[in-house]
Image (cartoon, rainbow, N blue to C red):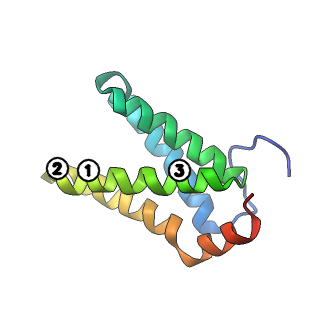
Amino acid sequence: MPANRWLDRTQPQTLMMATILMYVNAALGVIDGEVSAVPIGTVLVVGQVAAGWGIANEKKWGYWLGVVLAAVQLAFIVLYFSFGAVLNLAFFAALLALLLHPQSRSYRKTWFK
């Protein structure tokens, strides 16, 4: 496997889509001003890029970082729910479902280091 890849097309579809969703969410966080508005926003954006990179390079820490970040952001959305957060709720629920899908977990157990 080549080192430092951003997307691994040989992984199951669930992990590949989760990686793409993490990158997209990080980009939307930068566009939305999440990085400059709140210091924790910078941690979330950088963490999602790092988790996506870690999953693409089959690192256990990347998988677990992605699961923790998705769960934390989903919990914040549920706690501070507003009508405008419906799309964010669906987005992070889908991301967490992709990461915790049995196919993703099985692949992680077998191939991740």
Q: Is residue 63 left or right of residue 27?
A: right
Q: Which residue is mark 3?
A: 65
| Label 2, label 1: how far apart the Cα atoms are | 6 Å
Mark closer to the chain start, 2 or 3: 3
Q: Position of residue 61 (x, y in %)?
A: 62, 51
Of residues 57 and 83, the one nearer the viewer is 57
Q: Amino acid at mark 2?
A: Tyr
- Cβ atoms under marks 2 and 1 closer than 8 Å: yes
In the displayed structure, would residue 44 be above or below residue 72?
A: above
| Label 2, label 3: how far apart the Cα atoms are | 22 Å
- Residue under the image location 86 percent in, 52 percent down: 1
Q: Circle 1 — which element?
A: helix
Q: Amino acid at mark 3?
A: Leu
Q: Quadrant of residue 50?
A: top right
In the displayed orientation, state which residue is furthest to the bottom.
Answer: 102
Q: Which residue is mark 1?
A: 76
- Residue under the image location 41 percent in, 64 percent down: 94
Q: Position of residue 56 (x, y in %)?
A: 68, 51
Q: Which residue is mark 2?
A: 80
- Residue under the image location 50 percent in, 69 percent down: 100
Q: Position of residue 47 (x, y in %)?
A: 50, 39
